[in-house]
Image (spheres, rainbow, N blue to C red):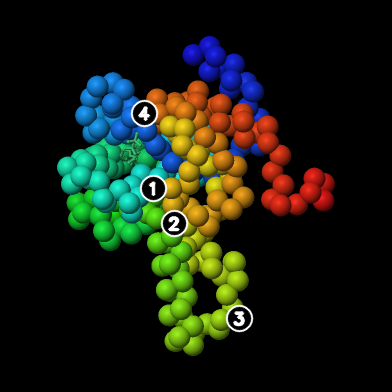
Amino acid sequence: MDSYKELLKLIDRKRLPQHIAIIMDGNGRWAKKHNCRRIVGHLEGTKAIRKIVEFCRETGIKILTLFAFSTENWDRPKREVYALMNLLSRFLRQEINNFQKNNIKLLAFGQIERLPTKVRIELAKTIDATRGNRGLILNLALSYGGREEIVHACREIARQVSNRRKKAEDINEEFFNNYLYTTGLPDPDLLIRTSGEFRISNFLLWQIAYSEIYVTPVLWPDFNRQELLLALIDYQRRERRFGKVKNG
Ligand code: FPP
């Protein structure tokens, strides 16, 4: 705890990332390491989510985007998918009061229509209830894939062009952005990946063009406030140039 307090002192509160995105990886490896079933790893991963949400809210981070379930995750054994969906709906049921109490707004993006009805119902209920909250935005990527998102955007734009509502010349980066699931939100400043893999795994392919990337070997269930502070310290040491030259 003492080292946590020391680390906290190193943070410049005026230069915090406003949007943090996390690829929460390593639940399965955590379970293996502790000789338990994969679902126990996911359960512990859910506890880590609670801690990180609390930290972001307290610290004044504006948006936390979590990769909670990818389009590829549907190919996992049926039992694991079922367990993950159960965890998700339980998480939403349990957290709704906390979200209200702490002014947290929930958003979700991805192929939401593929989720089981009971998850969609909990999601819609929580999103609706927290719509007016103005504190932290907790943004869950569910049944999400970056390529699918881009294809989805292209399909929508193609429809507009073929209906003659838009011209091909209207398409630029800003226009394209409006057709992504994340429209209205700023791009992540910091992308964190746990469990040591140097991969993007089809997450926010468009939005992370200029994000700072931080990879830690820590498995997601072990990722805590202290680990997030280390990521923030690393982020604040970097100079973000967005392709330009210093002072240019
Ligand atoms: C990766 O671990 C993690 C996921 C499949 C997604 C994250 C899910 C949770 C934290 C739990 C449920 C989510 C919510 C929002 C309640 P992995 O299984 O790929 O780990 P491995 O690579 O070590 O096998």
Name the element at disc 2.
Answer: helix
Q: Residue 146: which disc?
A: 2
Q: How many marks?
A: 4
Q: Residue 199: which disc?
A: none
- In the picture of the structure, the residue carrying the numbered disc 3 is 169
* Residue at screen point 47% across, 75% down: 157
Residue 200 appears at what percent x and percent y?
48, 46
Query: Which tag is nearer the camera, tag 2 or tag 1?
Result: 2
The type of residue carrying mark 1 is Leu
- In the picture of the structure, the residue carrying the numbered disc 1 is 140
Q: Residue furthest left?
A: 79
| Viewer-proximal residue among 173 and 133 | 173
| Ligand 1 neighbours mark 3 (CB distance < 8 Å) | no
Left/right of residue 91 with respect to residue 62 in the rendered view? left
The type of residue carrying mark 2 is Gly
Residue 117 appears at what percent x and percent y?
20, 55
Quote the CA–CA distance across marks 3 and 4.
47 Å
Q: Are marks 2 and 4 in contact (CB under 8 Å)?
A: no
* Residue at screen point 50% across, 30% down: 216
Q: Residue furthest top?
A: 2
Q: Specify whether residue 214 is in view.
A: yes
Quote the CA–CA distance across marks 2 and 4.
24 Å
Q: Are marks 2 and 3 in contact (CB under 8 Å)?
A: no
Residue 62 appears at what percent x and percent y?
53, 43
Name the element at disc 1.
Answer: strand
| Ligand 1 neighbours mark 4 (CB distance < 8 Å) | yes
| Ligand 1 neighbours mark 2 (CB distance < 8 Å) | no
Name the element at disc 3.
Answer: helix
Quote the CA–CA distance across marks 2 and 1.
14 Å
Quote the CA–CA distance across marks 2 and 3.
24 Å
The type of residue carrying mark 3 is Glu
Residue 229 appears at what percent x and percent y?
55, 27
